[in-house]
Image (cartoon, rainbow, N blue to C red):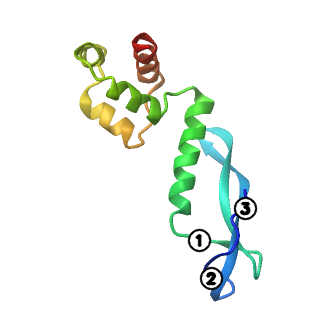
Amino acid sequence: MTKINSIDFCTHCRKETSYRICKSKIQKEIKGKTYEFNIKTAICDECGNKMDILGLLDENIKSVDEQYRKIEGLVSIADIKKLINTKNIETCSSLSELGIDEKTISRYLSGQMPSKEHSEIIKNLIQDSI
């Protein structure tokens, strides 16, 4: 995926220049384990250096989060939202009875990683609601 003809300030060239968005891979160590993630990188068309583009860092953080959840088999934010949208008395009481309160769900929705245990509980509730 390459986005062409975008313009921003390059801190290496010290001028407004066009850039392209390319896919790249990074390695990150999380809890003593090394993972490889796909991210987007802005490359200056003038000098070939990486550029910091508004919003790209946030997009990459969300992408890495999603990839990590998938690799580790953790429930996704989208799946948690799906469960909340089916919000019925039975689901809410099941979460409470299983030790997951509304504040915890709120933290998971804002990006905090659920424990494996909570992730499995939520996945099972989603599966039961299908």
Picture layout, residue 107 above or below residue 129: below
- Closest to the camera, between mark 1 and mark 3, is 3
Q: Cα distance, mark 3 to mark 2?
A: 21 Å
| x 37%, y 43%: residue | 110
**Residue 84 sits in quarter:** top left
**Placement of 73 over or under 48, stated as above or below:** above
Q: Residue furthest bottom?
A: 15
Q: Which residue is mark 1?
A: 52
The amino acid at mark 3 is Thr
Question: CB atoms at circles 1 and 3 under 8 Å apart?
Answer: no
Query: In the rendered structure, which amino acid carries the disc numbered 2?
Result: Thr
Q: Please determine whether, in this image, residue 25 is positioned above or below residue 18.
A: above
* Quadrant of the image containing the C terminus: top left
Q: CA distance from mark 1 to mark 3?
A: 16 Å
Kindly indicate the quadrant of the structure image that contains residue 85.
Answer: top left
Badge 2: few (under 14), some or many (20 or more) residues near its Cα, within 10 Å?
few
Question: What secondary structure is marked by label 3?
Answer: loop
Q: Which mark is residue 2?
A: 3
Looking at the rendered structure, which numbered label has been put on residue 11? 2
Residue 105 position in % (x across, y down): 32, 31
Q: Left or right? Give the position of 92 relative to 127.
A: left
> x, y (%) of residue 4?
70, 69
| Residue 111 in view in this figure | yes
Q: Nearer the viewer, mark 3 or mark 2?
A: 3
